[in-house]
């Protein structure tokens, strides 16, 4: 074969939407699977709440609300506009405080025992009435905790402005960081959750195949990124957490977001999906390939091979009971030439978004968290390789930790080098 002859990889094109370019993917997930996943998640939250001796949770983070009761309402908007919240009582009801006019979004959700209207006391919504609304909100939360807490006034809160904290504390409530509770609860997935996640990954890989199919000279970074948005949105997904797709010199240093720069033939295209897909689950996958389907040059093959070595080496280490410190000590040691452009971590948890734990790359591990891998966790194993003269290669795979090791949940092909 002439090394200058472009060719498409049929393995990647096989991940294109089999329904056709003009149709969304159709989920095969049954309603029973979804309902079992909902019940498991809420029960798991209440179990961990009991372990922390907390009477309840007050949740504003839309990802935590979806995990708890599976009610989704303008997730990106409500992430920065605290207009709706849920209260999960350890031994009591699940209460959804929805903003007026959206009550119907909670229909048919068994985890919601009671539906109330929310009180929005943020300045954008309340203006000069903020203080009055804050007091009404705090009175209601405190009274509800007293009714169902059995004398326990410890409340886990995930996101809140200082005024809310002060108002609850002035009413005798002890505020606990709910982040540690929700992250520990979310870390261990049920089999039904994994089935939901597999479907998100299928949708993501169809989007990745669309990116690949359009990776031709002249396509801009933003155009390529839009193909992942398109496949996710039309198949019932939610949003993309980042805009990490770049080509050529824009791949280094990493973390540039996609731009209007046209990709050139033979340049490396690298991306990280960070996709919140159908059912609210995350597909966090990274791949890199050349623009125009050209064979990699020697430099590109060298850094790509190093990235694959790092992924495969670290993936082979992970098993239940392995501590993060043991993983770090045995992990692939990034060569000095690549260290100035290294990624910030070696692995992290994933579920409805990026999750605990986050395990730093070995040069940065001294300040990393402690912990142990457990069966039921889903972990993303990452690599970013570049040196002073090269582009970057970004790779990432998503794996379920089983009782005997790991199972890869994604299967979109790596490059042949």
Image (spheres, rainbow, N blue to C red):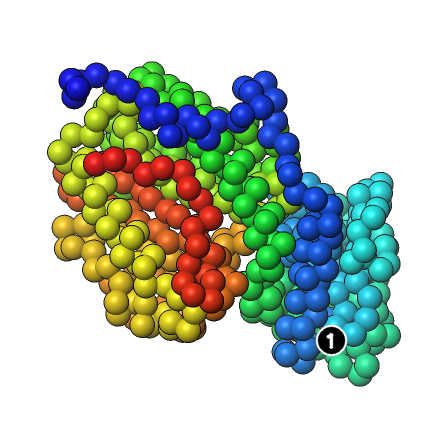
Q: Quadrant of the N terminus?
A: top left
Q: Quadrant of residue 246?
A: top left
In the image, residue 350 above or below residue 319: above
Residue at 80 percent of width and 51 percent of height: 109
Q: Which of these two is toward me, 140 or 224?
A: 224
| Horizontal side, residue 78 vs residue 397: left or right | right
Residue at 21 percent of width and 43 percent of height: 305
Outermost residue on the bottom side: it is: 151
Q: Quadrant of residue 160?
A: bottom right
Q: Position of residue 215 (x, y in %)?
A: 36, 23
Outermost residue on the front side: it is: 404
Q: Position of residue 312 (x, y in %)?
A: 29, 53
Q: Which residue is mark 1?
A: 55
Q: Position of residue 40 (x, y in %)?
A: 68, 62
Q: Which of these two is toward me, 120 or 58?
A: 58
Q: Quadrant of the C terminus?
A: top left
Q: Position of residue 216 (x, y in %)?
A: 34, 19
| Horizontal side, residue 196 vs residue 257: left or right | right
Answer whether residue 365 is visible to the viewer in this image.
no
Residue at 47 percent of width and 62 percent of height: 402
Residue at 50 percent of width and 62 percent of height: 377
What secondary structure is marked by label 1? loop
In the image, residue 128 above or below residue 166: above
| Horizontal side, residue 394 vs residue 208: left or right | left
């Amino acid at each position: 074969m002439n090394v200058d002859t472009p060719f498409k990889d049929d393995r990647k094109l096989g991940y294109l939407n089999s329904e056709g370019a003009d149709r969304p993917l159709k989920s095969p997930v049954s309603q029973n699977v979804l309902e079992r996943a909902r019940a498991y998640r809420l029960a798991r939250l209440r179990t961990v709440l009991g372990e922390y001796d907390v009477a309840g949770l007050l949740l504003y983070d839309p990802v935590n609300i979806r995990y708890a009761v599976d009610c989704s309402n303008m997730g990106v908007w409500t992430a920065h506009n605290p207009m709706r919240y849920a209260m999960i009582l350890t031994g009591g009801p699940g209460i959804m405080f929805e903003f007026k006019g959206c009550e119907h979004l909670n229909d048919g959700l068994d985890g919601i025992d009671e539906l109330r209207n929310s009180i929005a006391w943020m300045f954008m919504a309340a203006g000069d009435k903020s203080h009055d609304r804050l007091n009404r909100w705090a009175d209601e939360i405190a009274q509800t905790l007293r009714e169902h807490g059995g004398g326990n006034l410890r409340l886990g809160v995930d996101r809140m402005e200082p005024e809310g904290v002060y108002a609850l504390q002035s009413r005798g409530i002890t505020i606990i960081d709910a982040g540690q509770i929700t992250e520990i609860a979310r870390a261990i997935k049920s089999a039904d959750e994994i089935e939901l996640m597999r479907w998100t990954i299928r949708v993501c890989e169809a989007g990745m195949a669309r990116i690949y199919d359009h990776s031709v000279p002249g396509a801009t970074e933003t155009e390529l990124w839009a193909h992942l948005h398109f496949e996710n949105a039309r198949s019932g997904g939610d949003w993309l957490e980042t805009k990490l797709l770049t080509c050529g010199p824009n791949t280094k240093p990493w973390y540039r977001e996609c731009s209007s720069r046209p990709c050139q033939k033979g340049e490396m295209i690298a991306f990280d999906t960070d996709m919140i897909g159908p059912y609210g689950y995350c597909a966090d996958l990274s791949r890199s390939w050349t623009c125009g389907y050209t064979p990699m040059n020697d430099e590109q093959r060298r850094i790509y091979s190093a990235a694959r070595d790092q992924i495969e080496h670290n993936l082979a280490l992970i098993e239940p009971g392995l501590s993060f410190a043991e993983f770090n000590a045995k992990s692939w040691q990034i060569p000095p030439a690549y260290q100035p452009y290294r990624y910030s971590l070696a692995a992290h948890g994933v579920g409805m978004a990026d999750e605990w734990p986050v395990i730093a790359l070995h040069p940065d591990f001294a300040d990393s968290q402690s912990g142990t891998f457990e069966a039921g966790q889903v972990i993303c194993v990452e690599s970013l390789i570049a040196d002073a003269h090269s582009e970057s290669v970004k790779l990432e795979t998503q794996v379920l930790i089983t009782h005997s090791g790991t199972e890869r949940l994604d299967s979109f092909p790596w490059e042949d080098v």
